[in-house]
Image (tube, rainbow, N blue to C red):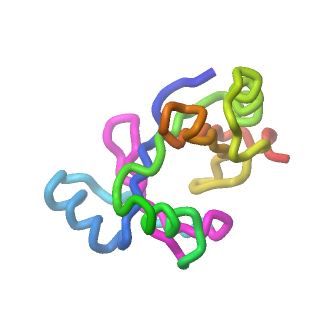
């Protein structure tokens, strides 16, 4: 079951540059910066109430964020929802006809278990399902 919007992922060329806007213009505080090698990305998190803003900077030229930036430029990349169990939520989405990017959850930023639904089956929005359930990992 979905519980809340966990975070909104925003693709940027440079966290160092984008961070200035979020801190100075919006007054948010960067809580942590983390590299997620499995996703070829560096992330920076800012809290706004119960929701986080996640800046996504590519670690190289071949990862998914680098490719997104080449196609789309900077901007909203995905919306992530907190759920009880990412594996179960992925299965439910697939049974409802959604195209999965990940059949089983993988470990993402903050150690969360994450899986993505393809935007072709979610009305154009890359959708991430995340949970703290380490037992849901393959």
Q: Residue furthest bottom?
A: 60
| Numbered range of the magenta stretch | 37-59
The location of residue 26, given as percent across then percent down, is 18, 51
Q: Residue furthest right?
A: 138
- Out of 137 and 123, give the one closest to the viewer: 123
Q: Is residue 102 magenta?
A: no
Position of 70 with respect to 61 (left or right) is left
> Can residue 32 be seen from the camera position used here?
no
Compared to 118, does 121 lie above or below? above
Position of 27 with respect to 96 (left or right) is left
Position of 67 with respect to 15 (left or right) is right
- Out of 60 and 73, give the one closest to the viewer: 73
At 58% from the left and 54% from the top, the residue drawn is 110
Q: Is residue 39 magenta?
A: yes
Q: Quadrant of the N terminus?
A: top right
Compared to 77, does 38 lie above or below? below
At 70% from the left and 25% from the top, the residue drawn is 97
At 40% from the left and 38% from the top, the residue drawn is 51
At 69% from the left and 46% from the top, the residue drawn is 101
> Can residue 127 be seen from the camera position used here?
yes
The location of residue 9, given as percent across then percent down, is 44, 50
Image quadrant in which you'd find residue 22: bottom left
């Amino acid at each position: 079951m979905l519980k809340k919007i966990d975070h909104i992922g925003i693709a940027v060329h440079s966290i160092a540059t984008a961070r200035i806007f979020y801190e100075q213009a919006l007054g948010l505080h960067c809580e942590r910066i983390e590299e997620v090698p499995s996703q070829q990305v560096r992330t920076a998190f800012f809290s706004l109430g119960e929701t986080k803003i996640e800046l996504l900077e590519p670690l190289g030229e071949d990862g998914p964020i680098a490719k997104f930036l080449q196609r789309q430029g900077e901007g909203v990349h995905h919306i992530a929802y907190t759920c009880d169990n990412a594996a179960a939520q992925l299965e439910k989405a697939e049974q409802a006809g959604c195209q999965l990017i990940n059949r089983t959850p993988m470990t993402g930023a903050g150690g969360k278990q994450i899986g993505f639904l393809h935007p072709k089956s979610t009305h154009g929005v890359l959708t991430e399902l995340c949970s703290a359930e380490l037992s849901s990992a393959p």
